[in-house]
């Protein structure tokens, strides 16, 4: 009887690698609505809303530092975040992974739908890119690197 040659590659069943850690999506104040939270949750995302953790009006550098410490993935609508020096410094020093919705003047329901449909693409970026980073998400759901 001929002997089978082993490929040398372990099978998936014998693999000792663990599944990736579940991601926590932090929805900042600019997107914090029941509509967005529900859409993201329905898409399988674990969501932390800004108003669950901080009082309204908390400075961005405060919650960005917390987001980095907790390992949360930030979702925001604040397109100017990359230009504000204190916010950018907080984002970079905390190693924040951020996605900025830049879809323009659309309803919160439309925003929620775009973000929910973009979850797989955003997860792929989070798992493949080293933090810190900022990506834009347009109305089409297309991701482009901002910084």
Image (tube, rainbow, N blue to C red):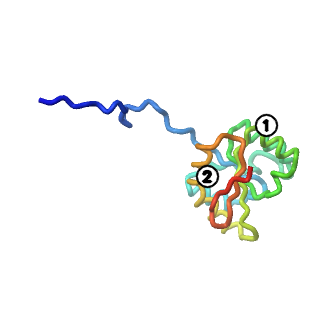
Q: CA distance from mark 2 to mark 1?
A: 21 Å
Secondary structure found at label 1: helix
Left or right: 50, with 85 as reference point: left
Q: Is residue 27 above or below residue 90?
A: below
Q: Nearer the viewer, residue 135 or 116?
A: 135
Q: Is residue 6 above or below residue 78?
A: above
Q: Which residue is mark 2?
A: 122
- Marked residue nearer the N-terminal end (2 or 1): 1
Q: Give residue 1's quadrant in the image.
A: top left
Left or right: 30, with 48 as reference point: right
How far across and down, in percent of the image, does residue 40 sit? 62, 56
Residue at the spot 87% in from the left edge and 50% down from the top edge: 84
Residue at the spot 74% in from the left edge and 55% down from the top edge: 76
Residue at the spot 49% in from the left edge and 34% down from the top edge: 18
Q: Is residue 72 above or below residue 42?
A: above
Left or right: 12, with 51 as reference point: left
Left or right: 12, with 1 as reference point: right
Secondary structure found at label 2: helix
How far across and down, in percent of the image, does residue 56 sit? 84, 52
What is the number of the mark on residue 93? 1
How far across and down, in percent of the image, does residue 134 sit? 72, 50
Q: Residues within 10 Å of mark 1 (few under 14, many from 20)?
A: some
């Amino acid at each position: 009887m001929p002997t089978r040659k082993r490929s040398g590659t372990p099978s998936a069943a014998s693999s000792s690698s663990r599944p990736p850690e579940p991601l926590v999506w932090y929805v900042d104040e600019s997107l914090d609505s029941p509509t967005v939270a529900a859409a993201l949750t329905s898409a399988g995302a674990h969501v932390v809303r800004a108003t669950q953790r901080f009082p309204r009006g908390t400075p961005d550098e405060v919650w960005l530092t917390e987001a980095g410490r907790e390992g949360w993935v930030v979702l925001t609508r604040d397109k100017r975040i990359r230009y504000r020096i204190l916010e950018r410094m907080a984002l970079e020093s905390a190693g924040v992974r951020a996605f900025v919705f830049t879809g323009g003047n659309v309803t919160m329901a439309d925003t929620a739908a775009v973000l929910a449909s973009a979850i797989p693409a955003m997860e792929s970026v989070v798992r493949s890119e080293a933090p810190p980073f900022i990506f834009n998400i347009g109305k089409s759901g297309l991701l482009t690197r901002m910084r």
